[in-house]
Amino acid sequence: MSASDLKSVEMYDLMVVGGGVQGAWIAFEAARTGARVILLEKDDFGAGTSANSLKVLHGGLRYLQHGNLKRIRESRRSVRSTRALAGDFIEDIPFYLETRGNGVRGRGAMRAALFLYGMLCRLWRDGGPGPAGKVLAGDPKRFVPGGIFSPGANGVASWNEAVMTNSERVIYEVVRAAEKAGAVCRNYCEVLEIEKSGEGWSAKFLDQRESSTRSVEAKVCIEATGPRVEERLSEGRLPVLRGVNLVFEGKPLGNQAVGLESREDTNDPDALVRRGNRLLFFVPRGDQTMVGTWYDRMEMPDTAVSEEDLARWLEEIEAVAPGMGFDRKSLRYVHSGLLPADDRVEDVAQPAKESAIFDLEENRLAVRTVKYTTAPEMAREALEELGWELEPRLRSGKRVFSDVPFPWESLLVAEEDPAEAILREGVRVEKVFHLADALLRRRNVVLDEECSVEEIHRAAERLGRVLGWSPENCRAEAEAVIGRLCTKIPERLWK
């Protein structure tokens, strides 16, 4: 959208600052009401903390330990909404957790938890049926081939969870749906300042595509900027954690996810039931396995991962899953992002349990999101707090889009250059501005497939012809993509 297009709207009803998962859902739900909505994101959609997750859309079973029925219901509703918009990028994966003894990890307790969860899902009837959970008695390896379990295990609990094959693409599908509903969604537009303007709000932003600074006005402003929300509210003290997941080549545990008890205590002040040490989950994704999550309190909001960090985590993985090949050689890449910390336990790296809405000024809110999963429900809650009447929640059914994503992998593997007209259309439709947008977010090409440095540089040259990059810019774009794997894993060897 050009500057003239923006000027065609004198005053938007809503301005959303931040194009991660939360901002995208706010823009979508608002646009569904017929409101004039603009979404501004300083980088690419879903390029920040939203991209750095274990890719699991949690159905809410885990919140039984807190007795948090509200969050269970929010999770169920949110998963259903996400499936309705982006079901092509979500698959059901069986999760397994060993049972042992007769306590909270015993078969009886797990059966009770699964029964209660299923009953709640049937009672509410607004988040779809609950997962078909079950508890099996006997040697866990009979039910989970290749699994690693403790000697005292007397069975397994099993249930399904929704796992995203591409969480960044899921966010972009929400952005596309928001645009289809009438919203204006712009990436690479950094909001520099927001100030009161008459009865609404005026934002000055830098449009990186056009290298120009412009302004836009809206009656209402909602900020959904991830850690930057915490920065504003903390007056210099930023209570955030670094959350990290490691991704390894291969699936030695097969096509099921397995939760294994680590050496660290949960230190969860909200748990109604003491459940022992923290769990590490091993989650299959394509031909890879994601492992996590680790949390560390950060004095400064930094996502960088050190060699010492990697050594510590790899040692812990080897302790709980010895000899399975989860080592430095098979380490593919690192997901690292910031998220709100629970400031009630200053000495413990514990994520905040609840998302929150902060009333900054009249008609100006900030939304703190703690889980990717519940962004749809948080979007509705924020708009309802403003007094908006919303459309009914999404239900699974007819697909919103019938087309498929542009085959960005053709930039890497095609023997001949993709047709310029087709490539130019892909750039326009999918709002691609950098090579990373195409190869890391619209499609997880580089992260999912083994490719060479030469292929990535060739992809940059091909895309650069359409976007007008100089040879120097092409090299910089390629190095930025390569660095996604190499800067945090310096010894990564390429074939």
Image (cartoon, rainbow, N blue to C red):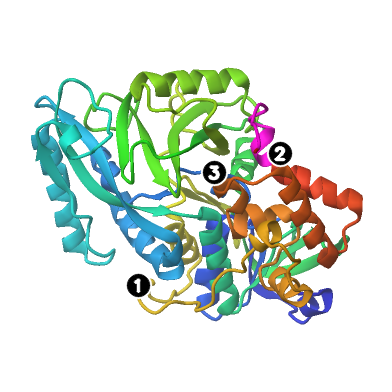
Mark 3 or 1, nearer chain start: 3
Q: Quadrant of residue 293?
A: top left
C-beta proximity under 8 Å, tags 1 and 2:
no
The reply to whether the magenta stretch includes residue 488 is yes
Residue 52, numbered circle: 3
Percent across and percent down for residue 251 are 40, 40
Q: Is residue 211 visible?
A: yes
Q: Which residue is under mark 2?
A: 483
C-beta proximity under 8 Å, tags 3 and 1:
no
Q: Residues within 10 Å of mark 1 (few under 14, many from 20)?
A: some
Q: Residues within 10 Å of mark 2 (few under 14, many from 20)?
A: few
For this view, does 297 lie left or right of residue 468? Answer: left
Q: Which residue is under mark 1?
A: 396
- The residue depicted at 76 percent of the width and 68 percent of the height is 216
For this view, does 393 lie left or right of residue 223? Answer: left
Three-letter residue code for mark 1: Ser
